[in-house]
């Protein structure tokens, strides 16, 4: 209602302006003919004239009506240069701010919601450099100021920033017009006030802030490097520290574009993903899932099925899977691709130099891709026991009877279910109100219920307090609602998160800045405060996914090698992920929790996979797809997919969101029958049903009745 009232008032002002033909008074000929009358009235009623002129100017600019240029000339003609400049400057800025606020209040929410994908880059730019952009536009009076007011109102620019930048930025152009007004008799046309030379001067003045910023950055970069002697020549174009996902892709891309690149790895090629993370966890998940299928044999029509297994053999299979994949990330493969691979411990000794194995190598740029390690919280008594993390749990060969898994994130959840299915009595302990804290509560509850059905004891709102050792066994004391709870175990897996590897190889000595989360602070180009040093992957954040590390690696390598010509901002607009529990949980974009937190309007469309033919045939008829869309539109804001092969099925939505395809496009795409992928089409069909044009269908129904006679 408030928006309707404001819009009504605005329309009333416009109607008065048009109905009373006010624009006939805002012509150069009219004000010339009435100049002496205006001046005489001003001499007799100075305060009234100033106030009336000020209010009229504010109304015209606030309502985005034509005539601001003429009003500025009138200000100069009546009040003179100094007084006219003061009056017009403040009136124009206040009026512009009113137009800005009207545009923001009436239109911004709907525009931002409808075009959020397209506007994300603009919003990021406005947040970082909005004042620069606005100031540059304000300095060019040839650009329609009323358009600037309305467009800026649709952005996230702060009102106070808009006002003071407008006040400052419009001052030069206003001065030109007010000064022209003092010489009103000599003006033949409004367009003639700005000569080509004057316009060029304003344009040059407009780009001055950007030139100044570039200059400041250049000075800062030189200051960061001035304490070090730059080599006259370089041994290589790029040194990459770390042979995990981010480092391998960085080196691969550099070699592919024929740069000379050196990759240094101190431990194992392939990093955490191959050796202690993605690969081994998926290998044990597969073995555990096979056992779960045997326990469900009656669901598949098999009256009785048994399996004998040796825990050590299962764990050895994990190592054999790693061994089969190792050649993909091996020294030999990357050497064959043209990468100079060095096995050793790197130490950055200057912005261009790295020591390794007693030798110093120089490069124009260095990329830090040192990954992360399991974070071990300071729990009293933890040092008294041999606990496991995701690094060393793969060395386990003797099956424990009772295991406590500390942590309810993806790693903790995947290994909790897997070890439970391998016959270990598992208790999962999480300090937060739910496991899988990044997902909607209903998702967490569904997974928790599955864990409980399989025999896992899940304890949420339990904070690990201390470890008490008792002979061969130990107890975790966790605090819950102010009460200590004792949880016995003979194996403890700590899986509460990962800490970036940022120390011990020279970053501290160079003064490379870190974020509050402990990652290397990088800009949108993945460049640190030391301009020759870039970072990507877990060590840079903000995501700790293998696929994100590879994604960042492209930007780090290309910006480091070709940044003198063109730099690319890392794009995090569509980041998918999956937790490979059963049921699998995959997500891209927003979920309901995040949408509510951001105050975004959304619609939810669900499709239950229990209704899908292929899921029923596979005895995997569980889970659902939940799609968030812009209200009334098929534009996808986010998707959560729960069920068999969710991590594979989510890819269609990742593609759709990346290329701004809506649910109608998915509905119009042929999907093979019978497949799980049909669920993606069916949820689009559910959206279509909910948005069927009922009035049109009523008319169609009448048409068919008429056709039947």
Image (tube, rainbow, N blue to C red):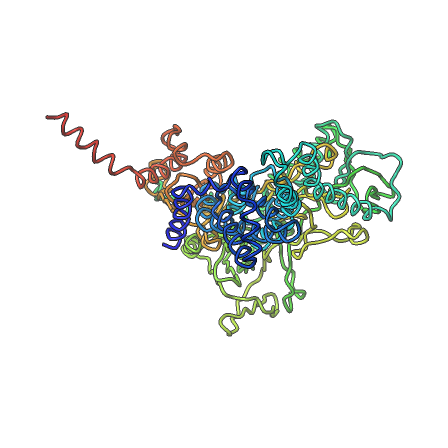
At x 38%, y 29%, the residue is: 668
Q: Quadrant of the N terminus?
A: bottom left
Residue 560 found in image quarter = top right
Q: Nearer the viewer, residue 118 or 652?
A: 118
Q: Quick one: quadrant of the C terminus?
A: top left
Mark yes or no: residue 246 visible: yes
> How far across and how far down the image is residue 19, in percent?
38, 42
Name the spot of residue 588 as percent of width and height, x first. Answer: 49, 43
In the image, is 379 to the left or to the right of 410?
A: right
Q: How many marks?
A: 0
Horizontal side of residue 94 vs 681, given as left or right: right
Residue 43 screen position, x and y as percent: 58, 55
Depth check, front residue: 250 or 88: 88
Answer yes or no: is residue 316 visible: no
Q: Residue at x 25, y 34 (%)?
A: 696
Residue 687, image x, y percentages? 35, 40
Observer-nearest of 187 and 114: 187
Residue occupying the far bottom of the picture: 483
Q: Is residue 102 left or right of residue 527?
A: left
Task: From the viewer's side, name the closer residue of 74 and 275.
Answer: 74
User: For residue 320, what is the image quadrant?
Assistant: top right
């Amino acid at each position: 209602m408030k928006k309707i009232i404001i819009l009504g008032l605005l329309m009333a002002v416009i109607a008065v302006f048009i109905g009373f033909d006010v624009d006939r008074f805002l012509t150069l000929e009219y004000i010339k003919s009435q100049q002496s009358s205006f001046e005489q009235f001003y001499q007799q009623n100075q305060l009234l004239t100033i106030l009336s002129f000020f209010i009229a100017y504010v109304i015209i600019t606030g309502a985005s009506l034509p005539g601001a240029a003429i009003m500025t000339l009138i200000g100069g003609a009546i009040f003179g240069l100094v007084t006219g400049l003061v009056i017009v400057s403040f009136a124009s800025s206040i009026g512009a701010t009113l137009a800005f606020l009207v545009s923001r209040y009436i239109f911004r929410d709907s525009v931002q919601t409808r075009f959020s994908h397209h506007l994300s880059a603009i919003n990021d730019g406005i947040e970082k450099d909005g004042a620069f952009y606005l100031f540059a536009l304000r300095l060019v009076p040839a650009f329609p100021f009323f358009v600037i007011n309305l467009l800026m109102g649709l952005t996230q620019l702060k009102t106070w920033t808009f006002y003071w930048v407008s006040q400052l930025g419009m001052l030069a152009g206003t001065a030109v017009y007010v000064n022209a007004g003092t010489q009103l008799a000599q003006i033949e046309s409004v367009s003639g006030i700005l000569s080509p030379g004057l316009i060029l001067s304003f344009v040059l003045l407009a780009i001055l802030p950007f030139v100044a910023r570039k200059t400041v950055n250049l000075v800062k970069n030189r200051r960061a490097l001035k304490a070090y002697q730059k080599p006259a020549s370089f041994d290589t174009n790029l040194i990459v520290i770390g042979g995990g996902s981010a480092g391998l892709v960085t080196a691969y891309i550099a070699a592919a574009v024929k740069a000379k690149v050196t990759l240094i790895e101190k431990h194992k090629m392939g990093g955490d993903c191959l050796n202690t993370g993605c690969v081994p966890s998926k290998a044990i998940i597969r073995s555990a899932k096979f056992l779960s299928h045997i326990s469900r044999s009656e669901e598949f029509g098999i009256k009785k099925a048994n399996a004998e297994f040796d825990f050590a053999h299962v764990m050895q299979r994990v190592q054999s899977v790693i061994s089969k994949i190792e050649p993909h990330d091996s020294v030999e493969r990357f050497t064959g691709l043209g990468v100079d691979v060095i096995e050793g411990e790197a130490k950055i000794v200057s912005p261009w130099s790295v020591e390794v194995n007693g030798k110093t190598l120089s490069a124009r740029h260095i990329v830090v891709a040192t990954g992360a390690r399991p974070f071990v919280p300071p729990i009293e008594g933890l040092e008294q026991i041999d606990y496991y993390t995701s690094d060393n749990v793969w060395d386990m060969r003797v099956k424990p009877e009772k295991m406590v898994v500390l942590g309810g994130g993806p790693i903790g959840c995947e290994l909790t279910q897997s070890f439970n299915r391998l016959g270990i009595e598992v208790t999962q302990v999480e300090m937060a109100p739910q496991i899988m804290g990044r997902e909607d509560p209903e998702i967490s509850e569904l997974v928790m219920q599955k864990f409980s059905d399989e025999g896992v004891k899940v304890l949420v709102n339990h904070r690990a307090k201390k470890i008490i050792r008792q002979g061969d066994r130990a107890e975790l004391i966790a605090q819950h609602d102010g009460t200590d709870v004792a949880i016995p175990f003979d194996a403890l897996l700590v899986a509460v998160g990962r800490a970036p590897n940022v120390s011990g190889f020279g970053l501290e000595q160079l003064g490379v800045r870190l974020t509050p989360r402990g990652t290397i602070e990088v800009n949108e180009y993945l460049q640190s405060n030391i301009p020759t040093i870039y970072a990507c992957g877990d060590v840079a954040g903000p995501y700790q996914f293998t696929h994100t590390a590879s994604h960042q690696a492209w930007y780090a390598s290309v910006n480091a090698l070709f940044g003198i010509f063109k730099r690319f901002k890392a794009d995090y607009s569509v980041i998918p992920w999956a937790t490979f529990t059963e049921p699998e949980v995959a997500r891209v974009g927003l979920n309901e929790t995040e949408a509510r937190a951001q105050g975004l309007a959304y619609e939810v469309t669900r499709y239950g996979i229990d209704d899908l033919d292929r899921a029923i045939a596979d005895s995997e008829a569980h889970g659902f797809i939940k799609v968030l869309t812009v209200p009334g539109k098929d534009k996808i804001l986010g998707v959560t997919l729960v069920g068999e092969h969710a991590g594979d099925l989510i890819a269609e939505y990742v593609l759709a969101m990346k290329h701004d395809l809506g649910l109608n496009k998915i509905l119009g795409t042929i999907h093979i029958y019978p497949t799980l992928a049909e669920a993606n089409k069916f949820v689009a069909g559910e959206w279509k049903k909910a948005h069927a044009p009922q009035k049109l269908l009523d008319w169609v129904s009448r048409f068919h009745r008429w056709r039947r006679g």
